[in-house]
Amino acid sequence: MTAIARPAAEDVDLASPAAAAAALRTFWRLAEAWGLSVPEQMALLGVGRSRLYQWKQGRVGALDRHVLERLSYLFGIYAALRLLLPEPGRADAWLRRPNAAPLFNGQSALQRMLGGQVADLYVVRQYLDAQRGGKS
């Protein structure tokens, strides 16, 4: 039996239009699961309305490294929530509930993530990884 050759991770061009389209398809599913509004999607991706709508219409070119970084954190947050709270409804609702942890200061994780800075996504991802008892 012959093994199917798969490209090494280093050989995959994450900035290619095909990879960008796949990443955005995943983001649209995440946005639906989390019930994100258009302004929330824009803030999380760090893009304007016209760019967001271009992408939604399938007009996707390569994504810049800033968007790729944001997507990476968002996908990590989604995955960590699924591990911590396996019931999808609970995991998705956690994002919008006020949180007493010092990092959130009574706000929800989503409110923190919507702060506009990549660092806001990073700290939520790190918080969830710490709750899992590990690192990303």
Image (cartoon, rainbow, N blue to C red):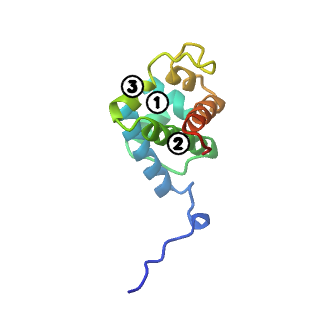
Mark 2 vs 1: CB contact within 8 A = no
The C terminus: image quadrant: top right
Rendered view: 45 above or below 3? above
Q: Which residue is mark 3?
A: 93
**Residue 123 rendering spot, x and y as whole percentages:** 63, 31
Q: Categorize mark 3 by other alpha carbons within 10 Å: few (<14), some (14-19), many (20+).
A: few
Residue at the (40%, 34%) spot, across then down: 31
Residue 97's place in the image compared with 31, above or below, is above
Residue occupying the point 58% across, 38% down: 129
- Badge 3 vs badge 2, beta-carbon distance below 8 Å: no
Q: Residues within 10 Å of mark 1 (few under 14, many from 20)?
A: some
Residue at position x 44%, y 45% in the image = 24
Of labels 3 and 2, earlier in sequence is: 2
Residue 110 percent across, percent down from the top left:
50, 24
| Mark 1 vs 3: CB contact within 8 A | no
Crowd band around label 2 with a 10 angstrom C-alpha radius: few (<14), some (14–19), many (20+):
many
Q: Amino acid at mark 3?
A: Ala
The span from disc 1 to disc 3 (Cα, nearest Å) is 17 Å
Q: Nearer the viewer, residue 3 or 61?
A: 3
* 31 lies left or right of 66: left
Q: Which numbered disc flags the more N-terminal residue, 1 or 3?
A: 1
* Left or right of 8 on screen, residue 84: left
Q: Earlier in the sequence, mark 2 or mark 1?
A: 1
Per the image, label 3 sits on a secondary structure element best described as helix
Camera-side residue: 118 or 1?
1
The residue carrying mark 1 is 41
Residue 92 locus on image (x, y percent): 39, 30
Secondary structure state at the residue bearing disc 2: helix
Residue with the mark numbered 2: 76
